[in-house]
Image: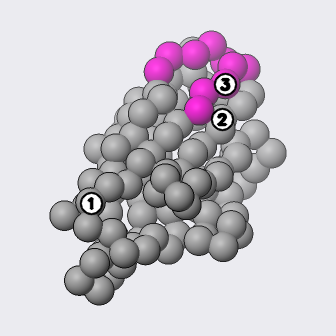
Amino acid sequence: QVQLVESGGGLVQAGGSLRLSCAASGTISSINAMGWYRQAPGKQREFVALITSGGSTNYADSVKGRFTISRDNAKNTVYLQMNSLKPEDTAVYYCNANLVSVTFRYLENWGQGTLVTASS
C-alpha cells in the first residue's frame, strides 16, 4: 500500500510565499514522475508542475517563473515552492506520483490535498 501525505498549505497574502511538501511511503520500489495539480472551487483539476526521477521539470504557463518544483529522492518527497502568490492561485493542491511497487506494479497515487488561499 502506498500513501502520499501533503503538508504546507495555508492562508497567505497576495505576493507572499508558501512551500508545499508531499512524502510518499509504503511498499515502493521506485518513483518515476512526481507532480502537483490544483483544483479551484467550481473548476476542474489542472496541472501545475511535474518533475521526473532525473530532475527534468515542466510547469503550467500560469505558474512559470513563480513556482519551483523539486524532489528529494532519498526521502521520496516532492516540494513546491510558491512565490508571488496571486488570488487566482487559491485552490486545493494535490500531490501525484507515478511509481513502481515492490511487487512490480505500476501505480498512480494521489494525496488527500492541501488548501492554499492567497488573499487580496
Q: Which residue is nearer to you in this view: 95 or 27?
A: 27
Residue 51 visible at all: yes
Question: Whole-percent x and y of residue 103?
Answer: 23, 83
Residue at x 29%, y 86% (from the top left corner): 104
Q: Identify the residue position indicated by label 3 in the image.
A: 17
Q: Quadrant of residue 15?
A: top right
Q: Identify the residue position indicated by label 2 in the image.
A: 82
For the residues labelled 3 and 1, the Cα–Cα distance comes to 30 Å
In this rendering, would 108 be left or right of 61? left
Q: Dot 2: few (<14), some (14–19), or many (≥20) neighbours within 10 Å?
A: many
Q: Which residue is nearer to you in this view: 39 or 70?
A: 70
Question: Whole-percent x and y of residue 18?
Answer: 60, 27
Q: Earlier in the sequence, mark 3 or mark 1?
A: 3
Residue at x 41%, y 48% (from the top left corner): 23
Q: Is residue 36 above or below residue 73?
A: above
Residue lying at the far front in this picture: please name it.
74
**Looking at the rendered structure, which numbered label has been put on residue 7?**
none
Q: Identify the residue position indicated by label 1 in the image.
A: 26
Residue 39 visible at all: no
Q: Is residue 65 above or below residue 27?
A: above
In this rendering, which labeled residue sits more in front, label 2 or label 1?
Answer: 1
Q: Amino acid at mark 1?
A: Gly
Q: Amino acid at mark 2?
A: Met
For the residues labelled 2 and 1, the Cα–Cα distance comes to 27 Å
